[in-house]
Image (tube, rainbow, N blue to C red):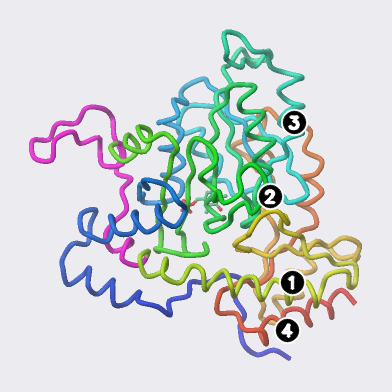
Amino acid sequence: MNTKFIPLSVPNFEGNEEKYVNDAVKSTWVSTGGGYVTKFEEKLAEYVKMPQAVATASGTAALHLALIVAGVGRGDEVIAATLTFIAAVNPIKYAGAEPIFVDCDDYLCMDPKSVRAFLEANCEIRDGKTYNKNTGAHVKAMMPVHVFGNMCDMEALMDIAAEYNLVVIEDATEALGSYYKEGRYAGKFAGTIGDVGCYSFNGNKIITTGGGGMLVSNRPEWAKRAKHLSTQAKADEVRFFHDEIGYNYRMTNLQAALGVAQMECLEKFITVKERNYDYYVQALHGKNGLEVLPFRTDIRANKWFYSVLLKDCGKSTDDILSGMSEAKIQTRPIWKLISDLEPYKGAQCADLSRAHYYFERVVNIPCTTNLTLEDAAVVADRLLEITE
Ligand SMILES: *Cc1c(COP(=O)(O)O)cnc(C)c1O
């Protein structure tokens, strides 16, 4: 029996993390000033091939800023995902707008067919703007989430966005490093296809700064305004001139020091994620009624999280969680649908049958970047044992 605890997803600090953080401490630049913030922004921008990136206190803050610079405000509506982390949707409410929940595809990402079906049945275009006929509200944006490092069908979503004149805010918080290999967006990273893209460096993400985020935009003036808003909209460094209502949303130099070190490891992390994913597929896929959900074949995925589908193994997600936990292996169920959570009950929804299907059947298994193949074998053996 396994005696060692195997966590789901924990940080991996094998690089220059301590060195850079110590350097930041010694310099006394621990807050939002200091060289690491700019350095981290430059490194990330270069990596995702964008001219500029704006470092924020969290991914949630980046998403909130994205909505503000996109002009989403009180009374507007935004097309949103339901099978994802609640932080992907809360910023819509911060901005005073309302989400419209749509279904996922078989990669757990926003389904273009569901988006189109909702728009066709409920909306009309007037003066180049999309209005919801049920509420009279202006549907201004869509926020596709690249779930677990997979990518949304961006060709189809961008076509719909062009047709209905919607701003596209990509939640790429789980997909740093994923990019299209083929098609119209070949070479384009998650987060760089729509109008704005957001990343997160929370503790369980592929790279971490403890907490932190980043925003990129194909509209240089939007990125500039996001940066301005993140520092209390300070228009003059010295004289306390603030020209609009800003936020304390800037990343600190301590966080950025970690970020610079983690960026140096990102490609190495993805290699390990790929290796362990391939192992799980070979060990589990098609056995005992289990499937390992695929990543799109037209992308290079960062393979951040692995999803096991309890297809017809006769066990519930709770059965798996408790069986794995007895063996000291941490697993988790996929998120409860946001549209079923208390704060969002009564929100407008498309048909969400796929999301319900996956909600009931998906568990995530250990995927840390220092997970050895031996650990992965322990995980797979235990899963097979309890689904025997
Ligand atoms: C992690 C995450 C966020 C929020 O990022 P934080 O840095 O934790 O604020 C938003 N959306 C999704 C889908 C996430 O997984």
Q: Are marks 3 and 4 in contact (CB under 8 Å)?
A: no
Could you tell me how far apart the alpha carbons at marks 3 and 1 are, in whole angstroms?
Answer: 33 Å
Instruction: Answer with mark 4 or mark 2, whichever residue precedes in sequence.
Output: 2
Which numbered marker is on residue 71? none
Residue 70 against residue 276 in the figure, above or below? above
Q: Which residue is mark 1?
A: 322
SS at mark 1?
helix
In the drawing, does residue 371 fall left or right of residue 19?
A: right
Picture quadrant of residue 19? bottom left
**Residue 277 spot, x, y in % from top left:** 69, 71
Which residue carries the number 4 mark? Answer: 377
Badge number at residue 350: 3
The residue lying toward the viewer, choosing from 172 and 179, is 179
Q: Earlier in the sequence, mark 1 or mark 4?
A: 1
Q: CA distance from mark 1 to mark 4?
A: 19 Å
Q: Secondary structure at mark 4?
A: helix
